[in-house]
Image (spheres, grey):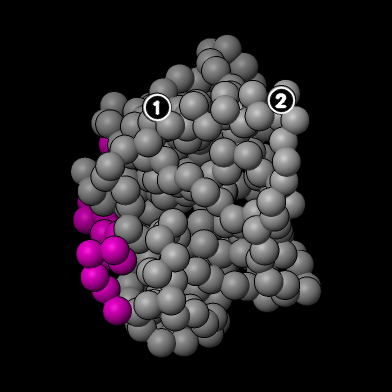
Amino acid sequence: MNHHFLILTIPTAIAVMTMILSPAQAQNQAETEQGFQHMHTDMKATFLIFLSMEDEYCLGTLIHKQWILTAAHCYLPFIEMNIASNEEFFYSDMGELKFLLSVQHPNFSRDSAEHDLMLIKLETPVELNKQLTLAVLPTATDGKTGENCTVSGWGWTWRTPFTSPDIQVEQKVLWFSEKYCQKPPTRQIPVEVTGNMFCAGVSLDTMQSCTEITAAPILCRNQLQGILSWSEGCVLKGDVGYYTKISRYTDWILRVIHTH
């Protein structure tokens, strides 16, 4: 999954398509699903929001009853939002989430992975319950090098055009050192890793394939430490991901919320 920028103009409804798979396609689907299923846990994140436009998806993280945090490269001018859940009755109970405004970080640039954050305000606050909770912002600015963290995300067991994500994954990863992220021992990376970013994964060496949604959140000690900005492989299978370090932006996040 590469760092890319989404600028689309025509909102459409998302429809699920039914397809008859060939034996080869069925085998590939089974292999993909099996690759995700062994990481699928019972403890699923309950603060994720689907952000979509036509066939493009990003994840949003609910940090306030009326505010969603996501990546700035996920800018979608005509956006549809839904609670990230497989349970159809939950959608109808919650109703449609309506967009009011978005605020990109003022220093974000499309030619850099730094400052890759955006806040989205909902028209009305959501009602929290056991199926919809808030992610907690970090309380300290120190790094978490060497800590075990969890990347929460969604993907497709088999993706065809205009199909919704159908599998939720909680992947355990390790927060790597800044030096290791900047200069991996086995390969070069095409982005500059600054002090406002960090990387995490199971290994820096492997690159696996999957179809996953960008802007996945990473939590360490139950606090939101990062939003996925860029990766070369599949973070939901443990490949290294490069994340915006939320602790460096807490003041900006709170300032935006308080002034809008």
What label sits on residue 198 in the rendered view?
none
Q: Quadrant of the N terminus?
A: top right
Q: Quadrant of the C terminus?
A: bottom left
Q: Which residues are magenta?
A: 127-145
Residue 49 x, y percent position in the rendering: 46, 63
Q: Residue at x 76, y 67 (%)?
A: 8
Residue 108: tell me if it is visible.
Answer: no
Decide whether residue 141 is among the magenta residues.
Answer: yes
Residue 252 x, y percent position in the rendering: 41, 68
Residue linked to disc 2: 23
- Residue type highlighted by circle 1: His
Query: Which residue is at the front of the view, 187 or 159?
Result: 159
Label 2 vs 1, first from the N-terminus: 2
Mark 2, other Cα within 10 Å: few <14 / some 14–19 / many ≥20: few
In the image, residue 257 sits, relative to residue 250, either above or below, namely below
Which residue of the protein is positioned furthest toward the top in this rendering?
Answer: 186
Decide whether residue 80 is among the magenta residues.
Answer: no
- Residue type highlighted by circle 2: Pro
In the image, residue 253 sits, relative to residue 185, either above or below, namely below
Q: Residue at x 34, y 32 (%)?
A: 172
Characterize the magenta stretch by its predominant secondary structure.
loop
Labelled pair 2, 1 in contact (Cβ < 8 Å): no
Q: Residue at x 22, y 56 (%)?
A: 139
Looking at the rendered structure, the secondary structure element under dot 2 is helix
Query: Which residue is at the front of the view, 163 or 245?
Result: 163
Q: Nearer the viewer, mark 2 or mark 1?
A: 2
* Horizontal side, residue 201 vs residue 209: left or right: left
Residue linked to disc 1: 38
Residue 85 x, y percent position in the rendering: 42, 59
